[in-house]
Image (tube, rainbow, N blue to C red):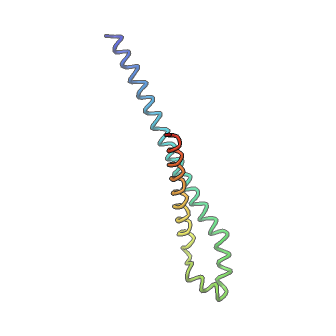
Amino acid sequence: MGILANFIASVSGRLFTFISAYFSINVGLRLTLIATLAASYFLVVNAFNAFIGPLLAVLFSTEFGQFLGLAFPPAAGIVISGLLSLWSAVLTYRYYLKMSGILVR
C-alpha cells in the first residue's frame, strides 16, 4: 500500500505542477497583453495631446480652423485614442487567431 500511495502522490503532484504552470503562463500572457494595450492607449493619448493638439490649436485660430473646431472638440484626442486602441486590439486578436490556426494544422 505504501508504494501505491507514493505513486499516487507523485502523479498527482506532477499533474498539479503541470496544470498550475500551464494556467500561470496563460494568465501571464493575458496580463502582458492588457498592460501592452493600456500602455499603447496612454502613449497615443499623450502623442495626440503633445503633437496634434497644439497643431489644431494653431489651426483653430483661423476661420477654417474654427469650422474644424466644431468637428474636433477637446475630447477628440481621447476618443481617437480609444478607437486606435480598439483597432489595435482587433488586429492583435486576428493575428492570434491566425497564428493559432497555423499551429493547430
Vertical order, 17 against 40 (above or below)? above
Residue sitting at the far front = 105
Please give the name of the residue rendered at 65% of the width and 77% of the height, measured from the top-left corner: 56
Residue at 41% from the left image edge and 27% from the top image edge: 15
- Measuring from the top left, give residue 45's x and y in whole percent: 59, 65
- Say which quarter of the image contains residue 81: bottom right
Q: Is residue 86 above or below residue 105?
A: below
Q: Position of residue 54 (x, y in %)?
A: 67, 75
Q: Quadrant of the N terminus?
A: top left
x%, y% of residue 94?
51, 53
Tally of numbered discs: 0
Instruction: Tell me where residue 79 appears, x and y as whole percent.
Output: 53, 69
- Residue depicted at x 64% and y 86%: 64
Q: Residue furthest bottom?
A: 63
Q: Nearer the viewer, residue 33 or 39?
A: 33
Name the residue furthest left.
1
State left or right for residue 19 relative to residue 33: left
Give me the residue at 55% from left, 80% from top: 71
Q: In this picture, is 79 found above or below 85?
A: below
